[in-house]
Amino acid sequence: MSKRVAVVTGANKGIGLAIVKGLCKAGFNGDILLTARNEKLGQDAVAGLKSEGCKNVIFQQLDICDQGSSLKLKKFLEEKYGGLDVLINNAGMAFKHSATEPFGEQAEVTMRTNFWGTLWVCHALLPILRPNARVVNVSSFVSKKSLDQCSSELQAKFRNKDLSEEELCLLMGEFVQAAQAGDHTAQGWPNTAYGTTKIGVTVLSRIQARVLTETRPGDGILLNACCPGWVRTDMAGSNATKSPEEGAETPVYLAMLPEGVKEPHGQLVWDKTVQEW
Ligand code: NDP
């Protein structure tokens, strides 16, 4: 049987790095690929974890905004492992409150990483998931808050259990266009680029879980979105309430759900608890 393997995106620092460490400490029995877009930062992170006793951590380059990079990783996984057992889509970005870029530009750039980047990684890697695989898309509680700020028409679309991936992509594109035109709030969107991209990640997870249930029934694959909480990282700053290790707890819990467990699946999970969408 092939060796098991986990992939964590954006893992050179912050919550991603803590997730890799958490998987290792939780006894993930296989290789853990710590991926990062910057090779030096990724290699340094791996060296740090190895010195802490995490021997099964390996670096692989992955820029989630570069579709070629995801396809290269897919090829590597197929050749070396014959599939994928755990995928944690953690990489993400947010503009600081002090950012001076126009809102339309912030919307486009944030959407490219948080939504499109995550989608491209999934398009490359979900087809090689092995039975009983676990997928965790790191979203945010902000997705729920932002959903509540959408017009009732948009809320109904985002809560529609039959929404397709194509329809969701169109909606994310419409938000960016509206943001660039300066009339996103008039069109019923919340006034947050980051929050809207995370609505996209949570809804994408619900759709992906439904599709997996339809296309691979009986394979025992579980896919969820999660919120790590408010975590002290470069993104959230030093006032946040959780350490990166605490932030990694829910993603690691979802990634390590034992074989045979049927849920959660297609949920937004926060503090190991399913949230109402
Ligand atoms: P950090 O800014 O500390 O880390 C973000 C990571 O994502 C970095 O490793 C960064 O790499 C990587 N990244 C960004 N863009 C890309 C890309 N194109 N390709 C590959 N990697 C990329 O943030 P956090 O650790 O706080 O955030 C991790 C996740 O958790 C994000 O999805 C975030 O939205 C989510 N989250 C965080 C919360 C918090 O309170 N911190 C709350 C809720 C959700 P690089 O170093 O090269 O920039």
Image: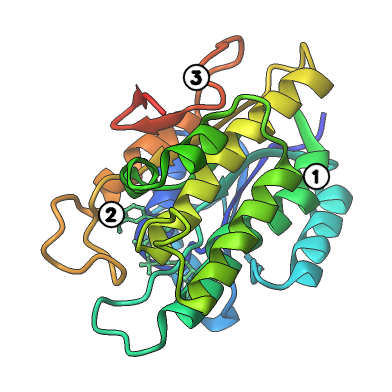
- Residues at discs 2 and 1 in contact (Cβ within 8 Å): no
Task: Compare residues 153 and 158 and report the one nearer the observer.
Answer: 153
Q: Secondary structure at mark 3?
A: loop
Amino acid type of the residue that numbered disc 3 sits on in the rendered structure? Pro
Amino acid type of the residue that numbered disc 2 sits on in the rendered structure? Pro
Q: Residue at x 49, y 66 (%)?
A: 46
Q: Residues within 10 Å of mark 1 (few under 14, many from 20)?
A: some
> At which x and y percent is residue 22?
39, 44
Q: Residue at x 47, y 47 (%)?
A: 199
Q: Quadrant of residue 93?
A: bottom left
Question: Mark 1 sits on what residue?
Answer: 81
Q: Quadrant of the N terminus?
A: top right
> At which x and y percent is residue 153?
50, 39
| Residue 4 horizontal side relative to residue 41, left or right | right
Q: Secondary structure at mark 1?
A: loop
Q: Quadrant of the C terminus?
A: top left
Amino acid type of the residue that numbered disc 1 sits on in the rendered structure? Tyr
- Say whether residue 42 is visible: no
Question: Mark 2 sits on what residue?
Answer: 244
| Residue 143 horizontal side relative to residue 216, left or right | left
| Residue 244 horizontal side relative to residue 201, left or right | left
- Please say if 137 is above or below 231: above
Residue reaching furthest to the bottom: 100
Question: Mark 3 sits on what residue?
Answer: 264
